Image (cartoon, grey):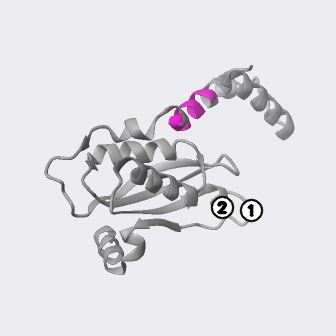
């Protein structure tokens, strides 16, 4: 099986030949190696566990009010075009005996943003991982992102896409949903 560096070397050589670029040009000599390193870093979410990302789960004090991580910046890769999409994630949940540290929520989000992704599934994966690990009363994830696959290709239109996933109390109770949306407003 080829290494990622070998794959990127072959891909880059074929790409340069197709577009008429000189692969031996000084500025391009180490590009395949840099591509392999970049993809290794940007797509390392496959090697990490959501449970481990959340870290310590606390039960003491049984906090039962909404916990919100607002506008966490992220970068991900569109699985359709291998171009970046980026923006912010807002994550909220209402504990039911268990809660995680805020840095655990950020690490959890990073696992799913560091995979080939679509924005809609990103919200779902984060929400379902929180639901599976913490068993909260409800979870809501809102993602606001720009997609370079839309902005750099074809009609080159600026994008601002918003998606959400609602589980439990957030799906059933409009007041809870409204409270979350008010908290994440700028």
Q: Which residue is mark 2?
A: 150
Magenta stretch, main secondary structure, is helix
Q: Which label is found at residue 66?
A: none
- Asked where in the image residue 69 lies, by quadrant, the reply is bottom left
User: Is residue 186 at least partly visible in the picture?
Assistant: no
Nearer to us in this view, 99 or 83: 99
Identified at 86% across, 38% down, the residue is 18
Identified at 36% across, 77% down, the residue is 173
Give percent across and percent down for residue 13.
Answer: 79, 28
Identified at 66% across, 46% down, the residue is 82
User: Is residue 110 at least partly visible in the picture?
Assistant: yes
Say if the magenta span includes residue 118.
no
* Crowding at mark 2 (Cα within 10 Å: few <14, some 14-19, many 20+): some
* Span highlighted in magenta in the image: 36-45
Give percent across and percent down for residue 131.
Answer: 41, 54
Give percent across and percent down for residue 170.
Answer: 38, 70
Rendered position, 108 above or below 142: above
Picture quarter with the N terminus: top right
Rendered position, 173 above or below 23: below
Left or right: 60 in relation to 134 = left
Q: Which residue is mark 1?
A: 154
Q: Secondary structure at mark 2?
A: helix
Q: CA distance from mark 1 to mark 2?
A: 7 Å
Identified at 31% across, 37% down, the residue is 55
Rendered position, 184 above or below 52: below
Left or right: 167 in relation to 176 = right
């Amino acid at each position: 099986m080829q290494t990622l560096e070998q794959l990127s070397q072959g891909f880059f050589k074929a790409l340069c030949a197709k577009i008429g670029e000189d692969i031996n040009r000084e500025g391009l000599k180490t590009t395949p190696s840099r591509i392999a390193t970049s993809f290794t870093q940007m797509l390392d979410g496959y090697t990490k566990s959501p449970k481990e990302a959340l870290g310590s789960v606390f039960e003491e004090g049984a906090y039962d009010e909404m916990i919100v991580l607002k506008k966490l910046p992220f970068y991900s890769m569109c699985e359709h075009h291998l171009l970046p999409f980026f923006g912010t994630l807002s994550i909220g949940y209402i504990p039911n005996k268990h809660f995680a540290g805020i840095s655990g929520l950020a690490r959890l989000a990073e696992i799913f943003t560091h995979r080939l992704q679509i924005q809609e599934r990103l919200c779902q994966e984060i929400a379902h991982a929180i639901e599976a690990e913490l068993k909260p009363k409800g979870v809501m994830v809102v993602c606001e992102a720009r997609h370079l696959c839309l902005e750099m290709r074809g009609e080159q239109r600026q994008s601002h896409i918003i998606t959400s996933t609602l589980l439990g109390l957030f799906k059933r109770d409009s007041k809870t949903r409204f409270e979350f949306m008010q908290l994440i407003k700028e």
